[in-house]
Image (spheres, rainbow, N blue to C red):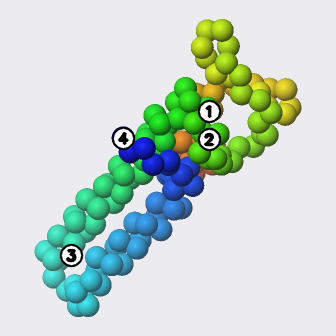
Amino acid sequence: MKDDKLDINDITLAPNDLARACLDMIIYGLTKDEEVVDNKEDAYDIVCDLITEIIYEIKRRIKRACEFYLRYKDKPQLLKEENIKCEYSKKIVEISQLPSGEWIIFFEDGDFMGYNEWLFRMAFKDVFEEDVFEDNEKGDE
């Protein structure tokens, strides 16, 4: 893994963002030769290529989220040193290490959470948003 710091803002699995990226790929794929595709076989080939690119883009984003998590797992001091800003609904007051070696985050409202769990939720924040799951349930009806 690279020693370069990873920016949490570069990691997004949000459906809207992925949809925009996919749409850009489709528009580019259908217009890259500046010809209108009028042959079903050509259109099929273009769509297959685009689906492959979309899958690659999703895998790339998941890989970035995993790299972020693995780089800072059990290393809150590195996260702080590299000045990584993670948006979270609660303000962090303190990060402490228990005698067991586990890191705990304490929030302004008195709540707390394991550092690694919090970090995982930050890396995959778009997956954990409730509206992502609600949208999928509505579509299944």
Residue 47 in percent (x, y) is at: 25, 68
Q: Are marks 3 and 4 in contact (CB under 8 Å)?
A: no
Q: Amino acid at mark 3?
A: Ala
Residue 80 vs residue 42, the one in the foreground: 80
Of callouts 4 and 1, which one flags the residue occurring earlier in the amino acid sequence? 4
Residue 81 is tagged as: 2
Residue 113 in percent (x, y) is at: 69, 25
Of callouts 3 and 4, which one flags the residue occurring earlier in the amino acid sequence? 4
Q: Label 3's element?
A: helix
Residue 1 is tagged as: 4
Q: In this rendering, is residue 88 above or below 25?
A: above
Task: Single out the mark in the foreground, 2 or 3.
Answer: 2
Q: Amino acid at mark 2?
A: Glu
Residue sticking out furthest to the bottom: 35
Q: Quadrant of the N terminus?
A: top left
Identified at 47% across, 68% down, the residue is: 20
Q: Label 4's element?
A: loop
Identified at 22% across, 64% down, the residue is: 48
Q: Amino acid at mark 1?
A: Gln
Q: Quadrant of residue 55?
A: bottom left
Q: Is residue 141 visible?
A: no
Task: Single out the mark in the foreground, 3 or 1.
Answer: 1
Residue 7 vs residue 37, the one in the foreground: 7
Q: In this rendering, is residue 63 above or below 18?
A: above
Q: Label 1's element?
A: helix
Identified at 16% across, 82% down, the residue is: 39
Mark 1 neighbour density, 10 Å: few (under 14) some (14–19) many (20 or more): few
Disc 1: which residue: 77
Residue 43 is tagged as: 3
